[in-house]
Amino acid sequence: MVKEFWNELLTKDSWNKLTELARKYDFILIGGWASYLWTKAHKSKDIDIVVDYGVLKELGSEFTVSKNQRMRKYEIKLEKFDIDIYVPFFSKLAIPPEEIAQYSANIEGITTVKPEALLVLKQAAEIERRGSVKGKKDAIDILTLLTQAPIDLNTYRKILKKYGLDAYEQELKCAVQAFGDKDIAYLELSFTEFKKWRKGFLDKLAI
């Protein structure tokens, strides 16, 4: 069984809220729960969504929605976790919110982003939060996506080129190289399997 990062009772409440939201509102899911949909490996705590302004207004009729000017997002703060809301032409993501829909996919009735786009978004989060608890979870999500999701490196590189993020490929190499032995327990791989995968992936990245 894969080692979980967050408390199971917390993630269960968060998942229930996510599925409830998906039945009522149109959004594109990003963040940790999007990684979970692609890999089924690690549940998340907070919910990260991209919405248009019409849906933002609808959310405001059910929840107390606050604007976080510094972080360029809107927030719904619940008792155990937050819902972070990103909107077009205001929020700053590695892939602009107004362009994320072109990378969308549907999994289990939830609209999320394709794994290559999600990898880019996850890298941006990890770089920003490196050294923190959430940054560690981002790194685990990145390695889980690489080992469990259908990532196409050519598609990934096209996204980097489009948004001027070419340095992310080197960052990805560093993230794979720096992944700690003690964190392999978070992956569905043994120590030997991970070492073999890492060598093969770094060789592929060098091509």
Image (cartoon, rainbow, N blue to C red):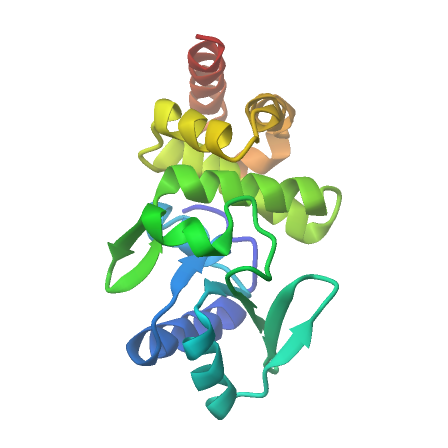
In this rendering, is residue 38 above or below 43? above
Front residue of 147/194: it is 147
Residue in view at x 42 percent, y 41 percent: 117
Residue 123 lies, in percent from the top left, at 57, 39
- In the depicted structure, whether residue 154 falls above or below residue 71: above
As displayed, is residue 134 above or below residue 164?
Answer: below
Q: Locate the C terminus and report the quarter of the image it occupies.
A: top left
* Residue 41 in view here: yes
Residue 108, horizontal then vertical, whole percent: 24, 61
Q: Quadrant of residue 139?
A: top right
The residue sitting at 56% across, 53% down in the picture is 5
Relative placement, left or right, of 22 versus 195 is left
In the picture as drawn, the residue positioned furthest to the front comes out as 89
Of the pair 134 and 7, the residue shown nearer to us: 134
x 42%, y 78%: residue: 54
State the image coordinates of residue 146 (x, y, percent, origin top left). 43, 32
Q: Is residue 139 visible?
A: no
Question: Which residue is the extreme one toward the bottom?
Answer: 61
Identify the residue shown where x is 33% and y is 48%. 102
